[in-house]
Amino acid sequence: MKKIISLTALVFLLVCFMAGCGMVENGERAVKQGAEQVEEGASRLMDDEKAMLNEGKDILQGDGMNNDGSATANGEKSKFIGEEKAKEIALKKANVTTESVIFDKVELEQDDGVWQYEVDFKKNTTEYDAEINAIDGSILKWEVENK
C-alpha cells in the first residue's frame, strides 16, 4: 500500500512538473510574441520618423506653408528659382566665380511670409551673406564682412 501511495505521489509530481514545463513554454512564447510586437512598433515608429524627415525636406525645398498656414501646392515649388540660380545671383553680385569660393550655407526658408534662399559663402578672408527672393531672384539682403 505504501508503494502504491508513493508511486501515485511520484506520478502526481511528474504530472505537475510536466504541467509546469508547459507553463514555461507558454511564458517563453508570450515573451517572444511581446518582443515581436515591440519590433513591429519600433519599425512603425521609424517609418513615421522617416516620413516626418521627408516632410521637413519637402518644406525646405519649397513644399511648405503659405502665409495663411495652408500648404503650398507642388506647382508653387516649380516657381522657385532653385539653389543653383540663387548661388549664381549671389556670386554675380560679389563679382567672384564658383571656383574661388567656399559655400557655407544655401538654404530655402520662409521669412515674414517670403520664400528666400539664404546664401552664405567665403572668398579668402571675406564673408558674404545674401538673401535671395526664391521666386523673382531679387536680392533682399546683402552683407559683406572682411575678417
Image: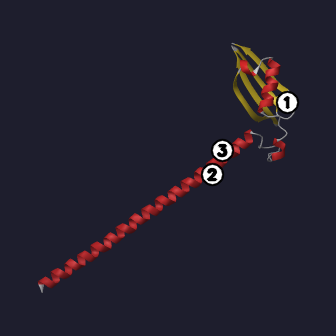
Q: Amino acid at mark 3?
A: Leu
The kind of secondary structure element at disc 2 is helix
Query: Sequence order check: which comes first, mark 2 or mark 3?
Result: 2
Do the residues under discs 1 and 2 have CB atoms within 8 angstroms?
no
Q: For the view shown, which residue lies furthest in the bottom direction?
A: 1
Residue at image mark 3: 53
Figure check: 147 above or below 68: above
- Residue mark closest to the camera, 1 vs 2: 1
Q: Is residue 82 visible?
A: yes
> For mark 2, does the 10 Å Cα neighbourhood hold few (<14), some (14 to 19), or many (20 or more) residues?
few
Where in the figure is residue 55, as x and y percent of width and height?
70, 46
Q: Amino acid at mark 2?
A: Asp
Classify the position of the C terminus by image quarter.
Answer: top right
Q: 38 left or right of 93?
A: left
Q: Which mark is residue 137?
A: 1
Residue sitting at x 76%, y 35%: 109
Figure check: 142 above or below 10: above
> For mark 3, does the 10 Å Cα neighbourhood hold few (<14), some (14 to 19), or many (20 or more) residues?
few
Figure check: 39 above or below 3: above
The kind of secondary structure element at disc 1 is loop
Classify the position of the N terminus by image quarter.
Answer: bottom left
Q: Amino acid at mark 1?
A: Gly
Where in the figure is residue 146, as x and y percent of width and height?
72, 13
Residue at image mark 2: 48
Residue sitting at x 43%, y 62%: 31
Q: Marks 1 and 3, Cα distance to the nearest angstrom?
A: 28 Å
Q: 22 left or right of 32?
A: left
Residue sitting at x 70%, y 41%: 57
Query: Sequence order check: which comes first, mark 1 or mark 2?
Result: 2
Figure check: 46 above or below 95: below
Q: Is residue 112 visible?
A: no
